[in-house]
Image (cartoon, rainbow, N blue to C red):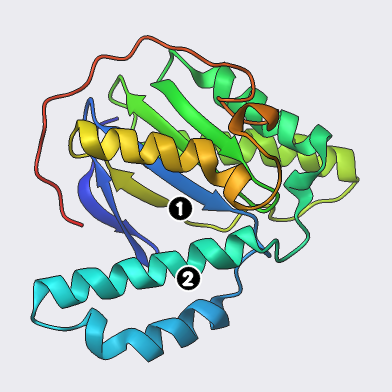
Amino acid sequence: MTHKGIHHRGFLPHWDFADSVQAITFRLADSLPGNVVNEWRRELQSLLNSTDSQISKNAQADLHRRIALYEDAGHGSCLLGKPAHAAIVQAAFIEGHGSTYKLIAWCIMPNHVHVLLRMIDDTPLGNIIKKLKASSAIEINRLLGRTGPLWMPDYHDRYIRDMDHLHNSQSYIRNNPVKAGLCEKPEAWPFSSAGINWTAEFIPPESKEAAE
């Protein structure tokens, strides 16, 4: 297997490069209805398609803020709000550490997850996410006595450009449970790297330019 570079899986663009650091979000299947995002895209369409790169960039940031606020409001079944379910996802993250990726930080929210990792072999990012989703979905569905999709098909990844970008991503992940009103301090959220005081050796990659 080899990395796929810049490519698309479904609607979203992805960056998949060897030794890259990635901030990844994936969501429960019922957490963010497609019609909601489509309406926001229609509203922002002229700005998103602007030939002015700064206007387009700002519109994309606005869209991401809306999605984050919607997620943190706790829409959908919020199955990951149950400790037994969140623990399964957290265990899957930790189990993969050191094989195809180095785990840097994560938080498991009631209807979505954020994970920051560094890829360490030739396994494509999409394969890593597919394995994490599949293993956790099997276990959670077994607990629920059900079958069917647990996660949305795609995922959002953010290629980490430099150390400032890394620190900002770590801060966002660390503080997401606090911002969503789930706890008063990051260390109080048990299903996160902050909550279990996770530490892992991390050597930053060389800074590379990446598309926003």
- List the single residue furthest toward the right: 145
* Residue 42 rendering spot, x and y as whole percentages: 39, 89
The furthest residue to the top: 201
Residue 63 visible in image: yes
Q: Nearer the viewer, residue 114 or 92?
A: 114
Residue plotted at (21% across, 28% down): 18
Q: Position of residue 108 (x, y in %)?
A: 63, 39
Q: Tell me the quadrant of the picture where the N terminus can be found.
A: top left
Kindly report the distance in space between the C-alpha atoms of the residues bearing marks 1 and 2. Answer: 17 Å
Q: Given the image, on which type of amino acid does mark 2 rest?
A: Arg
Q: Are marks 1 and 2 in contact (CB under 8 Å)?
A: no
Q: Is residue 184 above or below residue 111?
A: above
Q: Residues within 10 Å of mark 1 (few under 14, many from 20)?
A: some
Q: Is residue 122 above or below residue 146?
A: above
**Which residue is found at the position 84% from the left and 39% from the top?**
142
User: To which quarter of the image does residue 46 belong?
Assistant: bottom left
Instruction: For mark 1, give the secondary structure.
Output: loop
| Residue at image location 70% in from the left, 40% down from the top | 183
Identity, as a three-letter code, of the amino acid under mark 1: Tyr
Label 2 element class: helix
**Which residue does the numbered mark 1 point to in the structure image?**
155
User: Is residue 17 in view from this perspective?
Assistant: no
For image coordinates 57% across by 19% down, the residue present is: 94
Residue under pointer 2: 66
Could you tell me residue 44's position as x and y percent? Answer: 33, 85
Indicate the quadrant containing the C terminus: top left, top right, bottom left or bottom right.
bottom left
Label 2 neighbour load within 10 Å: few <14, some 14-19, many 20+? few
